[in-house]
Image (cartoon, rainbow, N blue to C red):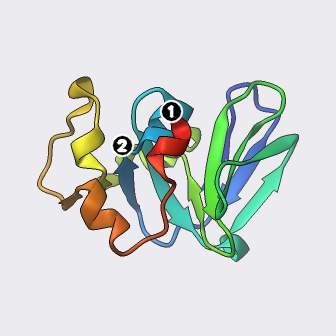
Amino acid sequence: MKGQCLCGAVTLEVTPEAREVSACHCRMCRLWTGAALFVFTAAPEQVSVAGPVRRFRSSEFATRAFCETCGSHLWIQDDGGDYELLPGLFEEAASFALTSEIYVDHRLGSAELCGDHPRRTRAEYESQNPFVEEERLQ
């Protein structure tokens, strides 16, 4: 799949591992996107990027990337992990199904998502995954 940022300065070519999207409603993702973060994953060897990308170390274990020219959000990546790419950059990703949702107990009232997919609360997610202390974001 081919994608690009809003201004076209950054282009991406990706072979996703699965054609599915997940959503996160944690405080950090809401601060970054304004609502919820939607992503699909691809291994580093399946991603090719060209253009002026800036990276921001958003936590002790992850980096977020954006276009240096227009500011479009591109991906989040845990250290040594897969790319978690924003589907809106890729026309083909419009057909990807929403298959999971985390931090549902922190979502905005206007961001309730429909569908019959697994939903996990903050406590459920954080019991098995690294996380950022929300108190740090106050």
Lower sequence index among marks 2 and 1: 2
Measuring from the top left, give residue 120's x and y in whole percent.
Answer: 23, 59
Instruction: Report crowding for label 1: few under 14, some 14 to 19, many 20 or more residues within 10 A (C-alpha).
Output: few
Q: Secondary structure at mark 2?
A: loop
Give the side of residue 35 with respect to residue 15, left or right: left
Q: Quadrant of the N terminus?
A: bottom right
Q: Nearer the viewer, residue 100 or 125?
A: 125
**Which residue bears the numbered disc 2?**
25
Q: Is residue 2 in view?
A: no
126 in relation to 74, above or below: below
**Image quadrant in which you'd find residue 99:** bottom left
Q: Residue at x 45, y 45 (%)?
A: 134
Question: Measured from the top left, where is residue 124 in percent x and y?
Answer: 25, 65
Residue at the location (52% across, 64% down)? Answer: 41
Give the residue type that dot 1 points to: Gln
Residue named by callout 1: 138
Query: Where residue 80 appears, x then y in whole percent?
Result: 68, 75
Identify which residue, 9 or 37, lies in the foreground.
37
Q: Tell me which residue sits at (64%, 37%) in the image.
A: 73
**What label does residue 45 carry, if any?**
none
Residue at 49%, 68% in the rendered image: 130
Residue 26, located in which quarter of the rendered image?
A: top left
Spatial separation of the CA atoms under disc 2 and disc 1: 16 Å
| Kind of residue indicated by mark 2 | His
Q: How many marks?
A: 2
Query: Badges 2 and 1: C-beta atoms under 8 Å apart?
Result: no
Residue ranking furthest to the left: 116
Q: Nearer the viewer, mark 2 or mark 1?
A: 1
Dot 2 alpha-carbon crowd within 10 angstroms: few under 14, some 14 to 19, many 20 or more: many
Name the side, left or right, on which 111 lies relative to 129: left
Q: Where is residue 112 shown, x and y percent of the image?
A: 20, 34
